[in-house]
Image: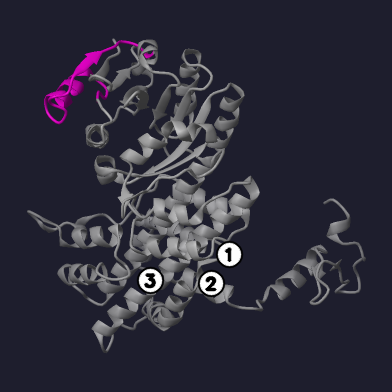
């Protein structure tokens, strides 16, 4: 198979894309794009994809074109290039090249090469093929959902070779690809001046501000994107729990859509609330589509990575963890179907005296739990920044998420304001705006969780958030008993109140010794 390369050419702007010749048959993800911005080259490599994914790439190319970043397209055959050029990209000028070497030769130095491929070995494989063709000072950008540990490793490996590596989070879905995504670049700081104008040109804007700023060194960009995706899991689960409660109350889809539409006019104004309304309203020839969709949710791993990172750093990101586990539970469809016929729940039928008032309670509960979810996410960012020595701008991160991405919402503007007021803020719950919101609405939150438990309607994310809130605001927790238990069976020692820093062991039974676990290796 011959590789193909489409190049968009004008007086000062050229865009290109190519297939890797015979390599394309072995690794169909090896396809490439490029952009030249003013007098600079910015080449982007995208994966070849099934037809339903092709539109994403077309949208991104058109977005770049409208920002004076010339764009082209060809996944994975020249026929698709021709179709794109004859339609969406009609009127542009295209030339061809037939190899990776040929394309690299056309790039102005320092070269900027961006990859958008599936995380893992595909990224390493492409970098390995690219390295012999580029030179010190060139920039490689990974815009896929890579794990932050991989990005940190690639950053160090490429820095040793003089290559400037950037791991950039990209969020926004199809709409973001077409009109501008949220971009979260991190890696080698010397790369940022070379790509800043391009990234801030094609990204989403919020009140005129670009939803893109430098995050930090190493794997910082992909870590921030991972936390973004974890928060996305949490937001979606909370909305699903609100939907489940409405279903339990016997509401029709039209009524639910109207309620979400009202919510979208207030503090919950967001992309996810908006699309939930649209999904509830959607009908095809057979009626409402949503009620016919199988109740099993998929996942690609970034939510799980967030939960794993939280465990690694010792941060109680409980809501996102429950959101991940809820997807896992949904996947047990056949088991749940059998269990539903054998395991009886409460006999109490879900009912309320004032449905309108209870719907307000659900909205307030969703708002409170959402605050906790973001508070936990930023706790994780802060702990990771301490460990990896990143200088994260938390207000800037909130702005990056304010537009273009899946979790974009008015709410994020309040988070940005909180960190502007106090850049050293340890927890969003301690900011006056969010503290007042929780205090004002927590009774609704407690009412909803209590009723859900009595009705047998699972609300794992809402209830986990409430448990975290009550735990966080407790000066004293029962962990003293837990530590005593640990010392009883494992001589793990404990600290006494007023004598912090001194670890002691008690011979609880009178039969054990006085040696503690801290004085020997076991």
Q: Residue at x 22, y 71 (%)?
A: 262
Q: Quadrant of the N terminus?
A: top left
Magenta region, residue range: 73-100
Residue wearing tag 1: 426
Q: CA distance from mark 3 to mark 2?
A: 16 Å
Residue 522 falls within the magenta-colored stretch: no
Q: Residue at x 27, y 73 (%)?
A: 246
Q: Quadrant of residue 407?
A: bottom left
Mark closer to the chain start, 1 or 3: 3
Q: CA distance from mark 1 to mark 2?
A: 8 Å
Q: Position of residue 32 (x, y in %)?
A: 34, 23
Q: Position of residue 361 (x, y in %)?
A: 34, 80
Residue wearing tag 3: 367
Q: Quadrant of residue 476?
A: bottom right
* Disc on res. 430: 2
Residue 270 visible? The answer is yes
Q: Is residue 82 above or below residue 247?
A: above
Q: Position of residue 435 (x, y in %)?
A: 48, 75
- Nearest-to-viewer mark from 1 and 3: 1
Q: Quadrant of residue 514?
A: bottom right
Residue 350 visible? The answer is no
Mark 1–mark 3 CB contact (< 8 Å) = no
Q: Mark 2 falls on what kind of element?
A: helix
């Amino acid at each position: 198979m011959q590789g193909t390369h489409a190049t968009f050419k004008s007086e000062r702007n050229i865009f290109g894309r190519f297939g890797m010749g015979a390599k394309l048959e072995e690794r169909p993800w090896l396809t490439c794009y490029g952009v030249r911005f003013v007098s600079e080259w910015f080449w982007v490599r995208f994966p070849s994809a099934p037809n339903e994914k092709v539109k994403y790439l077309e949208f991104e190319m058109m977005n770049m074109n409208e920002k004076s970043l010339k764009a082209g397209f060809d996944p994975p055959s020249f026929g698709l290039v021709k179709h794109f050029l004859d339609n969406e990209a009609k009127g542009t000028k295209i030339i061809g090249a037939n190899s990776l070497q040929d394309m690299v030769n056309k790039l102005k130095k320092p070269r900027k090469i961006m990859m958008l491929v599936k995380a893992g070995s595909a990224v390493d494989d492409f970098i390995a093929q690219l390295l012999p063709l580029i030179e010190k000072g060139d920039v490689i950008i990974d815009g896929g959902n890579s794990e932050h540990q991989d990005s940190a490793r690639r950053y160090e490996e490429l820095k040793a070779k003089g290559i400037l590596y950037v791991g950039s989070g990209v969020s926004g879905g199809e709409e973001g690809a077409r009109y501008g995504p949220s971009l979260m670049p991190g890696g080698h700081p010397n790369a940022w001046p070379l790509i800043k104008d391009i990234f801030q040109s094609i990204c989403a804007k919020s009140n005129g501000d670009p939803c893109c700023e430098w995050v930090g060194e190493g794997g910082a960009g992909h870590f921030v994107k991972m936390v973004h995706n974890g928060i996305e899991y949490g937001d979606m689960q909370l909305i699903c729990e609100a939907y489940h409660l409405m279903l339990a109350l016997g509401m029709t889809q039209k009524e639910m859509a109207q309620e979400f539409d009202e919510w979208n006019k207030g503090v919950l104004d967001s992309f996810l609330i908006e699309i939930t309304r649209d999904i509830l309203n959607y009908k095809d020839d057979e009626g409402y589509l949503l009620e016919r969709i199988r109740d099993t949710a998929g996942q690609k791993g970034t939510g799980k990575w967030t939960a794993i990172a939280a465990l690694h750093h010792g941060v109680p990101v409980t809501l996102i963890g429950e959101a991940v586990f809820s997807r896992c539970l949904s996947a047990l469809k056949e088991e749940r179907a059998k269990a539903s016929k054998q395991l009886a729940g409460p006999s109490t039928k879900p009912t309320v005296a004032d449905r309108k008032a209870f719907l307000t309670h659900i909205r307030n509960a969703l708002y409170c739990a959402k605050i906790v979810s973001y508070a936990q996410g930023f706790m994780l960012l802060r702990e990771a920044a301490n460990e990896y020595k990143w200088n994260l701008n938390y207000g800037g991160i909130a702005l990056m998420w304010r537009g273009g991405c899946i979790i974009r919402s008015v709410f994020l503007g309040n988070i940005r304001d909180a960190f502007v007021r106090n850049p050293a803020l340890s927890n969003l719950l301690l900011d006056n705006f969010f503290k007042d919101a929780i205090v004002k609405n927590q009774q609704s939150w407690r009412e909803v969780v209590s009723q859900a438990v009595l009705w047998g309607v699972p609300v794992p994310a809402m209830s986990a958030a409430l448990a975290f809130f009550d735990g966080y605001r407790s000066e004293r927790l029962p962990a003293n008993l837990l530590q005593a238990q640990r010392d009883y069976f494992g001589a793990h020692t404990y600290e006494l109140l007023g004598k912090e820093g001194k670890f002691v062991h008690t011979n609880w039974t009178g039969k054990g010794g006085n040696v503690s676990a801290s004085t020997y290796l076991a």
